[in-house]
Image (cartoon, rainbow, N blue to C red):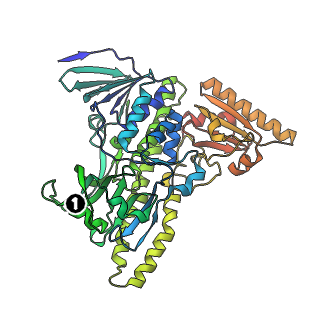
Amino acid sequence: MTSHSTNPSQVLIAGGGPVGIGLAIELALRGVRSTVIERHVRIPPIPKGQNLTQRTMEHFKAWGVEQAIRDASPIPVSFGIGGLTAYGTLLSAWHYDWYQRVIVRPYYACDNTRLPQYATEAVLRARASQLPEITLLTGWTVRDLAQQETGVEVDIESADGERQTLAAPWLVGCDGARSLVRERAGITQTRDDHETRMVLLVFRSKSLNDLIARYRGKSFFNVLHPELKGYWQFFGRVDTGETWFFHSPVPAGTTRDNFNFHQYLESVVGAPFDCSFDHIGFWDLRFEVANQYRAGRVLLAGDAAHSHPPYGGYGINTGFEDARNLGWKLAAVLEGWAGPGLLDSYDLERRPVFESTAHDFIRNFIEVDRQFLHDHDPARDQADFDAAWAARAAGSPAEIQGFEPHYEGSTIVFGPPAGRCSAAGTHQFTARPGHHLAPQLAADGANLFDKLGPGYSLLVLGERDDPHQSALISQWVGAAEAAATKSGLPLSVIRDTSAAASKAYGATLVLVRPDAFVAWAGEGADAPAEQVMSRVRGAVPIA
């Protein structure tokens, strides 16, 4: 039996995992009411999505949970959260530091950390419970949806068979890789199967720590084995004690009962050790991306929009960036100041970034490793292998330096003429339209990043000795404020006399979006303020 209820929410969110709850928090902090529909009453205790980047920690800071996330982490800062790549076995003579995110720390406002996804979800749920704009329905599953011109109706079912219909102006599918919302909205996918069966093991071992004591401060470990043709055997710490997870290819047809997983783990480590299993699960290695992230009043975020193998810690972080990007744009539509192109920019920005992440980084890891294992073999020519391995180690920092998601090709930023949205870029302090704003110290010693407002922020930087230049800057700022007031766009003007910040950013004026990406930067004479403010809210048609 289906009952109908009047739902006051402005947004329905299917899926209350980390991305869905994160989106609800982002919306709530902008005054938007949402209902989150989540089938799990208790959070599944599977330790995936552990590597939380500096950028993700910026989201958590904005959402008011940064310290709670750090307090929940079972891996203390003093331990270290770096990675390591080894050849053959984990204990082999060939290994080097891998994916040290500390390299790009100066370009972000927060340190990264590690936390199992279930613990991250618990922190986010606790935060959501503090926000009256959020209604969380646990134990309910979305069964169907119907879209009208002015909104979406969603049929939901409880675990005991009760049915309800909820309605709201917008629906966001955060319901995972097998998204029913995506299917019912008629959104197709592009899929790239690798025909590789993978296992996820969660296990406990008291002696593994002692075996790898030489790798103090490392929290995740990749093992390259020539027989696996570039696919990783991947260990990660759940804590600093005895709990671990492990991903690896396994033969087709492998089940819980027909394979000796303990023996397999020992072969990967290169020594015997005690082991007991908490979880044995399987998944298929594939890349999937929705061919559009929006269909009318239905949008997708997180794994519902895209999924890929858990290589390099991209998955959960990509989902959180979706939530932050979509949240302020959806709020702008509901608040009435968004131009007709603003919400469309969500797909335009986020989908190419995922495609680049999948192609330029994750696929590339597999292909480069496959070629390396084909070309170099210590049993065949150890001198050649040693030289090639040393070259790999020397080039490892470039991998993290080159992962710099940006929106140069977006219609709502003033990027370069040939710009495109991509995950491949370079970290810089210069304030480049479409790129994340790097932190700088203000004249009072505080971080300019911390002074950004919840809406758009206009940084007015440096001291001006020239009265004419000062007058021009003041006129531009005044025109920008007037344009913002007229359209309803929320704008904070932040004046700072720091010449060092102006020099680092390479501009006197820097317009920053609500998600801390630069929309425009200049001196005021290079673009009329009204034109800038119209374009950044999606009101200017782009040819």
User: Taking 88 as reference, is 528 above or below it?
Assistant: above
Residue at left offset 63%, top offset 46%: 439
Picture coordinates of residue 514, whole percent (x, y): 56, 35
In the picture, which quadrant includes the N terminus? top left
Picture coordinates of residue 149, whole percent (x, y): 36, 24
Q: Is residue 148 left or right of residue 31?
A: left
Name the quadrant containing residue 486. Answer: top right
Residue at left offset 50%, top offset 43%: 57
Q: Is residue 46 left or right of residue 60?
A: left
Residue designated by label 1 = 262
Q: Amino acid at mark 1?
A: His
User: Taking 187 as reference, is 216 above or below it?
Assistant: below
Q: Residues within 10 Å of mark 1 (few under 14, many from 20)?
A: some
Seen as rendered, the residue at the extreme left is: 258
User: Taking 246 as reference, is 511 above or below it?
Assistant: above
Q: Can you see residue 416?
A: no
Picture coordinates of residue 357, whole percent (x, y): 43, 54
Q: Is residue 202 left or right of residue 403?
A: left
Nearest the eye: 130 or 496: 130
SS type, badge 1: helix
Q: Can you see residue 538?
A: yes
Q: How many marks?
A: 1
Picture coordinates of residue 446, whole percent (x, y): 68, 40
Nearest the eye: 185 or 140: 140
Name the quadrant containing residue 152. Answer: top left
